[in-house]
Image (cartoon, rainbow, N blue to C red):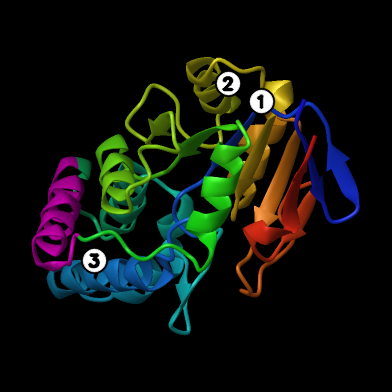
């Protein structure tokens, strides 16, 4: 039986850990901020005046990225709908607004670097130790499943992770059924699974999905308290395995 000690708490009989990707395993803050800025700039070139409100909606303020903002935690579809809503307020029809947004997003995809970002320092070592102890591991991301798979292949994580899930499934964050589905795919009980992420959506999904514990991770960033988090840590070394 595996127990995990974290700060002043022990989680007993743990069989699996499920991670968020962006901001939790992948140091993608700069990439996501640049992505939001380029999307807003292209849309503003067609609909002058919507660029700044779009950046605020995406969660980009004073050059920084809000880890709880739409760009950080929302799916591509959710970002498209939010952007189209701002355009529709200028008097464009909904179909025309969506066409403008999707065209801008596709153009940004064409010019932006598609190589996955670096993982946070010591992240891989912690993952290897979790897997080596016999824990099952999974990823649930607001990115698409293909992007999650690409990230795993790029960083050679396939030996460690049994489940890789994105936003293109029937359920999306923070729907607890997504967490429960991941547990089902891993063959574990949610009550024997930890959820680790950097947003309240991760914590809400895990908590309402019956997780043994929901742990927020900051990697040294300044973060607001996450709703439904049992605790917050700065890096994965705070999790210590005992038997």
C-beta proximity under 8 Å, tags 3 and 2: no
Q: Mark 2 touching mark 1, by CB under 8 A? A: yes
Question: Residue 154 vs residue 242: left or right?
Answer: left
Mark 1 neighbour class, 10 Å CA radius: few under 14, some 14 to 19, many 20 or more = many
Q: Position of residue 212 (x, y in %)?
A: 76, 31
Q: CA distance from mark 2 to mark 1?
A: 6 Å
How packed mark 2 is, by other alpha carbons closer than 10 Å (few <14, some 14-19, many 20 or more), is many
Extent of the magenta region:
95-114
Nearer mark to the viewer, of 3 and 2: 2
What's the mark number on residue 180?
2
Nearer the observer: mark 3 or 1; the answer is 1
Q: Is residue 98 above or below residue 72?
A: above
Dot 1: element: loop
Q: Nearer the viewer, residue 9 or 42?
A: 9
Q: Look at the image and tell me in which quarter the N terminus lies.
A: top right
Q: Which quadrant of the structure image shows residue 114?
A: bottom left
Report which residue position mark 1 lands on.
209
User: Which residue position holds label 3?
Assistant: 39
Residue 97 % position (x, y):
19, 50
Q: Identify the residue at image location x=22%, y=43%.
A: 94
**Which residue is depicted at the point 15% across and 58% down?**
109
Q: Position of residue 44 (x, y in %)?
A: 21, 72
Looking at the rendered image, the quarter that the C terminus falls into is top right
Instruction: Say whether residue 97 is magenta.
Output: yes
Residue 140, percent across and down? 47, 37
């Amino acid at each position: 039986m595996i127990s995990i000690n974290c700060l002043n708490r022990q989680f007993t009989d743990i069989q699996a850990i499920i991670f968020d990707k962006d901001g939790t395993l992948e140091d993608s803050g700069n990439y996501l901020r640049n992505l939001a800025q380029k999307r807003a700039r292209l849309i503003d070139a067609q609909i002058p005046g919507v660029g700044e409100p779009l950046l605020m909606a995406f969660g980009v303020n004073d050059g920084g990225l809000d880890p709880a903002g739409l760009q950080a935690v929302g799916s591509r579809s959710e970002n498209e709908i939010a952007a189209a809503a701002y355009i529709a307020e200028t008097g464009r029809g909904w179909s025309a607004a969506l066409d403008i947004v999707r065209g801008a997003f596709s153009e940004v995809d064409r010019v932006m670097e598609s190589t996955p970002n670096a993982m946070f320092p010591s992240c891989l070592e912690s993952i290897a130790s979790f897997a080596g102890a016999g824990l099952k591991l999974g990823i649930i991301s607001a990115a698409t499943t293909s992007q999650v798979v690409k990230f795993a292949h790029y960083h050679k994580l396939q030996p460690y992770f049994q489940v890789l899930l994105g936003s293109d499934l029937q359920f999306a964050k923070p729907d607890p059924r997504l967490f429960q589905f991941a547990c089902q795919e891993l063959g574990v009980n949610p009550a024997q699974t930890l959820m680790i992420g950097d947003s309240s959506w991760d914590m809400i999904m895990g908590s309402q999905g019956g997780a043994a514990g929901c742990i927020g991770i900051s990697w040294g960033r300044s973060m607001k308290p996450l709703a439904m988090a049992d605790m917050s840590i700065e890096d994965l070394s705070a999790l210590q395995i005992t038997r």
